[in-house]
Amino acid sequence: MKEHVLLGDEALALGAIHAGISLAYGYPGTPSTEIIEYLQRVQGEWSYRAQWCSNEKTAYEAAVGASLMNRRSLVTMKHVGLNVAADPFMNSVLMNIKGGLVLAVADDPGMHSSQNEQDSRYFADFAKMPCLEPRNQQEAYEMTMEAFDLSERFHVPVMIKLVTRLSHSRAVVAAKDDNEAREQNQKEKFTGTTDYMVLPAISRRNYAHHLDVMKELESWSEEHPRNVLEINDARSDIAVITTGLGGNYYEENLDEMEPAPSRLHISAYPLPVNKIRRLAESADRVVCIEEGYPYVERLLNGLLPGDKVISGKLDGTVPASGELNPDNVRPAIGLEPMTVAAIDPGPLPGRPPQLCPACPHADSFNSIKDALEAYPDSLVTSDIGCYTLGFLPPYNAIETALCMGASIPMARGAAESGMHPAIATIGDSTFMHSGLTGLADAAAANVPMTVIIMDNETTAMTGGQDTVVSSPQIRRAVEGLGVDPEHIVELVPLPKKREENTAAMKREFEYRGLSVVIAIRECVQTLKKRNLAKKAVKQAGDASGAKAAEKAEA
Amino acid sequence: MKYDIILSGVGGQGILSVAAVIATAAMNEGYRVRQSEVHGMAQRGGAVQAHLRISDGNIPSDLIGRGRADMILSMEPLESLRYLDYLKPDGRLVSASEAFTNIPDYPDENGIHGAISKVANSRLIATKDLAKQAGSIRAANMVLIGAAAPYLPLKPEAIQKAVADLFMRKGKETVDINLKALEMGRAA
């Protein structure tokens, strides 16, 4: 046994290593990013490979491909990334999974760094995929190993679901010694001819089979030691169901709950229906405290007799949006608010996140705004990245953001509805993620619009992960999709080039066809990191040089 | 024993290294620790907070509840006021006095300092001045930890060892400057 101090993401990654993964694929997305980053950082002597992909869909598909070769594979993404990977995700339950396939998805209740707070348990339910929901770092480690076992035992993919506060919270994890890690599976192609095939006739059979497997998984869930039912006969007014971090916040207040109500904490899905019924028998009212959407709560209406009162997010007992915390679960369990230090500092100005000093995006925005001054009306669509902050003052440069890659098709739709100039702004990583197809459409129709690819040569918002293609490759891709080379303009977004860049943009905005401006300058954060690393290497070099000189003198 | 700290500041000020020093010291003393951090977009120059929980028993929640924090430890004075709700009635506030003014509507600094002084157990410390005296302005956060140290349930040696361990790979000179900054904060 060895103790490690780990983020929830890192604990999950270590669990995957000790479960004997061969391959890990993912696309960066807060709060899931640190899973792949940890796998890459501790690589050392391990022989697995952990890689970033163009998007979540390609990552998921690569993981399925590894699984059909009997390799254990992990695929990681944030909750909205699963929307992008939904196609392979939904169909992967119909595969006769060979090597363990585990999807690690991290939700972001409270939207710390996201556009919505969708609950991935609904996706697991939709696909009929088992889901494990750890609530601390130790469980994240142990349940990841369990997820691989489960996947190979039932031949299904398994979802393991984290949330921001677990992904990004650090605690001690008691882990196996590295030499106790499971060996990787041997390379071995699948043997059943229909194991990885979805032709309708085959899918019909596989789906019927999967429904039978679900029955077995329901029994597995009923018996799962982490679906913990505690009946207390001393109290019959309320019983409590907790899921995820809701269980932690409930426990944080438990010493004020005397006697403690009967309680069921659910960590493994599909739902343990019999345990829920047994819990409900113990009390008149069932209170649900769930981090995420009211997933269990909604199903209770169909599971419990009509005279049971069900309370939670649907009746407003628990806040329906945002993150749970130790305070906002108190009313649901009949506790008064905590006493706080009675000092009111008065209204304080907010301090929203902002672009870094000297950020290249700021220079691009300045030129876009300068170039648009000549037009009474215009539309600037944008996308998901640091540059979404261009919506805020002092820039106020962009007007829309929907989802990864949407800037280009949205500008197209607006242009074809009569808007001119219609401008799409998109980062290099997002362009590779979901921008290519939109640009292909726009090129095919020669839509009068301008796409500005803000190429900072990294995936900046999530901390500077390498992108899968370089700047020259982006230009060639744009050419290859059919954009007129005369209207592909490269520029360097710098304050001293503001006028020159503005003039170039004006020309392209004026052009009544498709143009692409590629603004290339490295992110200041990755540049800083690279310079520090260089300095460290140089210092190490100097130190060893000095030692060598000393030796030579001696 | 249970000691809950809200750490606050502005993204990029080094809140996580402050948390790491205190957490490492607490673990060296055999306590259990939970530390909730902010990653992602919020780190870009925005208001950030971290929750650091130290206990000799089980800690269920990563987040500290309102009215339960023993200390607010802040790298920036305005940011220290944002989380007063979290403080216990007899909780303590320790903040760097220097404003980080990356917003256009930053309030009058004297007003902010005045509001802080209204918190019964509060303390403002000129971390950058002392850090400069210790040898590097970059050691400001160690001055801050030093100023908080007398109130933490941790032995001075445990904190010193944590600082030494965490800065070791940056060389002996850096370790010495940071240890000196820590002591200057404590003595101030």
Image (tube, helix red, strand yellow):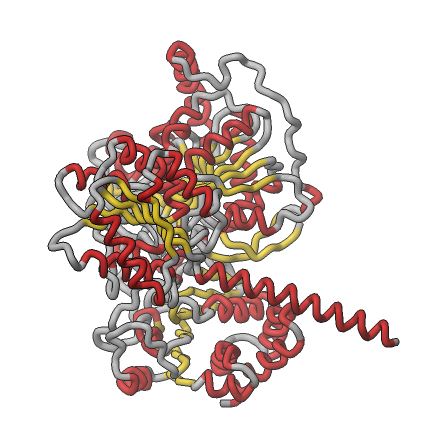
Residue A109 locus on image (x, y percent): 33, 49
**Residue at the image point whose x is 42% and y is 22% from the top:** A215
Q: Is residue A216 visible?
A: yes
Q: Is residue A341 above or below residue A219?
A: below
**Residue at the image point whose x is 44% and y is 25% from the top:** A92
**Residue at the image point whose x is 16% and y is 57% from the top:** A374
Q: As drawn, is A125 to the left or to the right of B27?
A: left
Q: Which quarter of the figure has residue A6?
A: bottom right
Residue A479 locus on image (x, y percent): 38, 38
**Residue at the image point whose x is 28% and y is 59% from the top:** A367
Q: Is residue B36 above or below residue A483?
A: below
Q: Is residue A506 above or below residue B87?
A: above
Q: Which residue is nearer to you in this view: A477 or A552?
A: A477
Q: Which residue is nearer to you in this view: A502 or A124?
A: A502
- Name, please, the residue furthest toward the top: A201
- Name, please, the residue furthest toward the right: A554
Q: Is residue A129 above or below residue A390?
A: above
Q: Which residue is nearer to you in this view: B41 or A318?
A: B41
> Number of marks in the image?
0
Q: Which quarter of the figure has residue A456?
A: bottom left
